[in-house]
Amino acid sequence: MGRSMTWIFGYGSLVWRPGFPFEERRPAWIRGWQRRFWQGSPDHRGVPGRPGRVVTLIASDGARCDGMAYRLADDTAAGVLTALDHREKAGYRRLVLPLYAPDGSDAPFAEGLCFAAAPGNPDWLGPAPVAEMAAQIRERHGPSGPNLEYLARLEAALRELGVSDPHVEELWRATRAPE
Ligand code: BEZ
């Protein structure tokens, strides 16, 4: 039997906590999408009525979003996808996109599946002034923990990967600025 071709691309919590078995992982990026803390989380990093802010992908010409790609084993792929659909249920839908390696190769190394919440879904929060988003992230908590921990872990994981994401860095600085 050949190698499994099922790849998952993570750009949020899946960067630091995939929570599923995989055969291989490698840093990757996707073209034409940017990471934004514009999706409400009423079930992980907040609660209904007081949602946290978590990342989604926004289509943007020429943009690049860096994250981590995971290759699944054939015998676990179906179960992993079902579990992810459940874990990420609030507003997220699957996308299949070409995955590029950070080494500068022009051709994608694979196609990967990722999850994006589209504008207008029931938990959509959309853009807001940085100070407002930072205040929300500082205050909100949900069953998976504090919203601030989600941002802190994402910021640390991207820094470890050597990835610069101005949106994440700006929000992280704003949560740490004195009020
Ligand atoms: C991710 O980490 O890639 C992810 C972000 C939002 C929903 C599901 C997964």
Image (cartoon, rainbow, N blue to C red):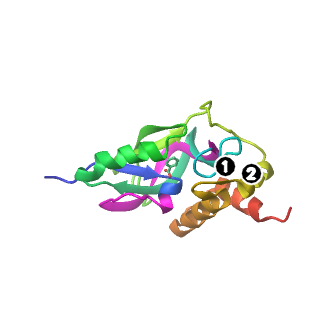
Query: Which secondary structure, mark 1?
Result: strand
Q: Which residues are magenta?
A: 15-41
Q: Which residue is mark 1?
A: 52
Q: Main secondary structure of the magenta part?
A: strand
| Above or below, 121 relative to 64 | above
Q: CA distance from mark 2 to mark 1?
A: 7 Å
Q: Which residue is at 43% across, 42% downward?
A: 85
Instruction: Tell me: 89 left or right of 76.
Output: right
Query: Which residue shows up at 66% across the image and 42% down it?
Result: 48
- Does residue 67 show up? yes
Q: Which residue is at the front of the view, 35 or 84?
A: 84
Residue 112 is at least partly visible in this image:
no
The reply to whether discs 2 and 1 touch (Cβ–Cβ < 8 Å) is yes
Q: Quadrant of residue 134?
A: bottom right
Determine which of the numbered discs, if any, sits on residue 136 in the image: 2
Q: Badge 2: how crowded within 10 Å, few (<14), some, or many (20+)?
A: some
Q: Assess mark 1: CB under 8 A from ligand 1?
A: no
Q: Amino acid at mark 1?
A: Gly
Residue visible at 80% across and 64% down in the picture: 177
Q: What residue occupies the far bottom of the structure in this picture?
A: 160
Q: Is residue 137 left or right of residue 67?
A: right
Q: Quadrant of residue 172?
A: bottom right
Q: Position of residue 13 (x, y in %)?
A: 52, 56
Left or right placement of residue 22 versus residue 41 in this view:
left
Which residue is found at the position 44% from the left and 43% from the top? Answer: 86
